[in-house]
Image: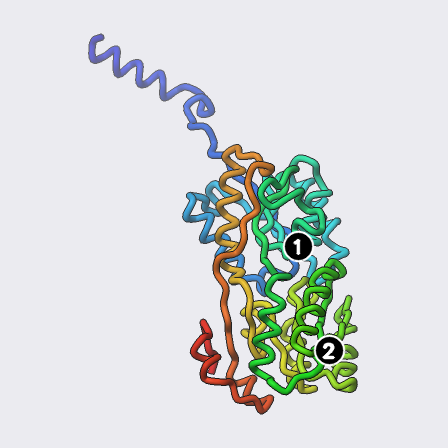
Amino acid sequence: MRQREVIAGLGAAAAWPVDLCAQPARKISRIGMLETTDAALNRANLDAFRAGLRALGYVEGQNLAIEYRSADGRAERFAAHAAELVASKVDVIVTRGTPAALAARDASPTIPVVMAASGEPFGTGVVAGLASPGGHVTGLSSFNNELEPKRLELLSEFVPSIKRVGALYGNPVFSARWEVLKASARVRGLEAVLLDVRMPADLEPAFAAAARDGVDALTISIDGLTQANRTIIAALAAKHPLPAIYPAKEFVDAGGLFAYGVSYPDLYFRAATFVDKILKGANPADLPVEQPTKFELVINLKAAKALGITVPLSLQARADEVIK
């Protein structure tokens, strides 16, 4: 072909309609997040999730969009928010907590659900089994029931004189955890007292009743209500005053005494891998629910001093983080 024909051909190509020359648009993966608290309170976990996605090649504004919905500590809101995410045609829904996972599962029979953390995914029927989840839900367990005896052991080390321990539980699916705590308390010769709270207005009366009825220390559950009100809970524990062990570092960051539990940012980082596999065609039913691998003990010496507690040096040495 002569040079002038090549140039003419290029000129003709330049005149073609733009839509015929354009590259195919990059697919944007749409992820819905059904959360217990707003994005500001959930920042550490959300940052970890985004970091996990970035490591797998997903960047917001380029090939990723995140739709975030928060129940703000009110579990009854999950169903409506899950329906909104389904209507917005997200590809995957990521959840925090058992009530959110149940709401997302029930909102659509086909949209995959990834649990970033769920305390009781098997016992509550979210999945058929951990090794073989079945259905369209998979993800990570936060292992909370199994950690109650350890929390009680640590609480006894902090306050060796305790006789009555109060359990502040704000989630109706915690019956199994309550049974575990009662059994562990009996082994230690302690009396367990249930403080059943369902809304923010229940918190002040629950703390007042615990102090009035001779409760020596508290173990706090992790659920939408306690997460959304963690600063208030830490302040009430200081006010009454009652030593308390919390289930996650975020409560200590809010002023709580100490915490032992899984690293939730680590779970969220790992949840990104589930999302990636599903977006690439994996069936959630074939992805086993994974257990946590990273646990942390965090101690707030400032809160301990305010309560008149001297934290044993042996405990400080075992802590992953000590806040002074």
x 44%, y 25%: residue: 18
In-front residue for pair 299/111: 299
Q: Is residue 173 above or below residue 126?
A: below
Tell which circle, 2 or 1, labels the residue nearer the N-terminal end: 1
Residue nearest the viewer, comparing 51 with 259: 259
Pointer 2 with pointer 1, Cβ within 8 A: no
Identify the secondary structure beneath mark 1. Answer: loop
* Percent coordinates x, y for residue 251 in the rendering: 59, 72
Q: Residue at x 62, y 54 (%)?
A: 118
Depth check, front residue: 152 or 67: 152
The CA span between labels 2 and 1 is 24 Å
Q: Residue at x 57, y 62 (%)?
A: 42
Q: Quadrant of residue 231?
A: bottom right
Amino acid type of the residue tagged 1 in the rendering: Glu
Q: How many marks?
A: 2
How crowded is the residue under tag 2: few (<14 C-alpha within 10 Å), some, or many (20+)? Answer: some
Q: Position of residue 323 (x, y in %)?
A: 48, 79
Left or right: 132, with 323 as reference point: right
**Circle 2 sits on which residue?**
191
Q: Residue furthest left?
A: 2
Q: From the top left corner, tell me how far across and down residue 77 is, in percent.
A: 74, 55
Please state which amino acid type lies under the numbered disc 2. Glu
Q: Residue 324 got which mark?
A: none
Percent x, y of residue 190: 69, 78
Q: Residue furthest top?
A: 1
312 shown above or below 60: below
Q: Residues within 10 Å of mark 1 (few under 14, many from 20)?
A: many
User: Which quarter of the image is occupied by the N terminus?
Assistant: top left
Q: Which residue is mark 1?
A: 120
* Residue located 50% across and 43% down the image: 64
